[in-house]
Image: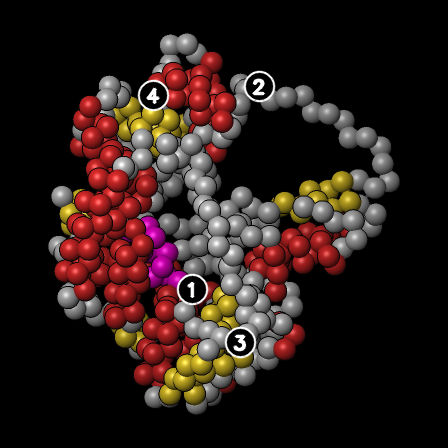
Amino acid sequence: MRVYATSRGLDPGRLTPGHDLVMDIDPAHGLDLAEGVLADDHLDQAIRWEFHGAGLPAVIGCREALDASLTVNGLCLPWLWELPAERALITMIGHAHALRRAVERFDADVLVLAGADARLRRVAAAVASSAGIDVVQQPAKANASRAPAGSVVFVSYWPLMPLLDRMLADPGRRPAVLMSRLPTGPRNTVRTALRGGWLGTPGPADRRHAARSATRALAAAGRVAPAPLELCALELGAAAHAEILDIARARAASDLATAATLRRAFRRALISSVMSACDADPDGRLITSLAQAAGIRTLALAHGAYLLPQTLVDLDLCDEPPLWSEAVAPPITNLERPIHVVGYPAPTPTAPPIRPAPASDRPRVLVLAQPAPYGVGLAGPRIAMRQYAAAVGGVLAHRPHARIVLRPHPSAARREAELELAARLPGATF
């Protein structure tokens, strides 16, 4: 059985169940990829719940092995990375279960890895060892595409922008800007910096010192034996250990340099409080924990609606969490502190008037997409394309001349599903 890391760059019509298997799907292939070709097709809901719950214990096992070697200047880096670590391990565990089930279903006697990434090689090795079959690696096909190189721009969390607008409108408020997470629009950035100042980014000296510290910590971590991790007759300890070290190599120097800059700023500047987006992701944990160590009040706004079970509890670290609503709040366990219900963030206290829709035989209909929530493991990766198809089919059944506008989720970095569906629907845009 030929196994691909992704369907991106491949012709989905030429991939057949039992002969081809892809671990990740190009969103545009959500309808065209045959059932059984995507590894996720072999997972039922019961097994999803199992590896959803296995992510955090796997993180804890890896942390027991790595915390000591990856603690630098009192900052425990594996603790800082718990959220991306949980997401990576849930993904890896899901891939391992799916690949094993595909091997059993199609009675594969060899796995041929085409253009495999590091995670796929680890997972395939564990599954092949369990099944007693061989793994053969070969280069990716010439037509396999690669993600284009480019810059990544980080901006402030969007629900906090209305709060910033109100603070800028009040002469008595002094918001300050974090240069690594700028507000939307240069005018707001300049006004914020002039009003309350700014926290800079690491300079050359901080980066050099952090790189040296990270190199020493990574060398020590590389000598640590992986903690065992057996799930459904698969030994995944070495694969899980490698996932954490991948995160460490990607983040250690950058996070240590940022920590040095923040510590210096919190020690020298006159700061009354820190407002961030959440305190479970690494950036949120870093700024919240260092501000608390400096005696600065911390607030962290909930992401929004928490509708799926969460194993890594968000907003348990900050001093005061503002929530949109208690009905969709994260499963907070730290209840002995001020908790504020602030409502949905809106730029004005009152909603703007609703404009009457113009009479038309061709109404415009907005269709929203929800991608599979990463790091949860409870929904399949075909979800965006299937939601689009169901919604568009329903609209056209009642309004065949409607103009359909496809609205990607803000977290979708690419627009494969929208481009593919728009090409199939005359008059559809996004």
Residue 104 position in % (x across, y down): 44, 83
Which one is earlier in the sequence, the residue at label 2 or at label 3? 3
Question: Label 2 vs label 3: CA separation?
Answer: 56 Å
**Looking at the image, is 39 positioned above or below residue 180?**
below
Label 4–label 3 contact, CB within 8 A: no
Question: Magenta segment: does it hold 202?
Answer: no
Q: Residue 96: which quarter of the image?
A: bottom left
Name the amino acid type tagged 1. Arg
Residue on which the image places disc 1:
48
Q: Secondary structure at mark 3?
A: loop
Q: 287 or 95, which lies in front?
A: 287
Q: Mark 1 or mark 2: which comes first in sequence?
A: 1
Residue bearing mark 3: 141
Whether residue 105 is visible here, answered yes or no, is no
Q: Kindly identify which numbered label has been placed on residue 231.
A: none
Task: Identify the residue at image location x=41%, y=69%.
Answer: 117
Residue that numbered label 4 is attached to: 197
Q: Amino acid at mark 3?
A: Lys
Please give the label number shown on residue 350: 2
Find out whether the residues at labels 1 and 2 contact each other: C-beta distance under 8 Å. Answer: no
Mark 1 → mark 4, Cα distance in angstroms = 47 Å
What residue span does the magenta drawing correspond to?
Answer: 82-91
Looking at the picture, how far across and down is residue 264, in whole percent? 20, 30
Q: Is residue 268 visible?
A: yes
User: Where does residue 164 sit, x and y in percent of width and height?
Assistant: 44, 23
Q: Dot 4, crowdedness within 10 Å: few (<14), some or many (≥20)?
A: some
Residue 89 inside the magenta-drawn segment: yes
Mark before the other along the chain sequence, 1 or 4 = 1
Marks 1, 3: nearer the viewer: 3
Q: CA distance from mark 1 to mark 2?
A: 42 Å
Badge 1 local density, few (<14 within 10 Å), some, or many (20+)? many
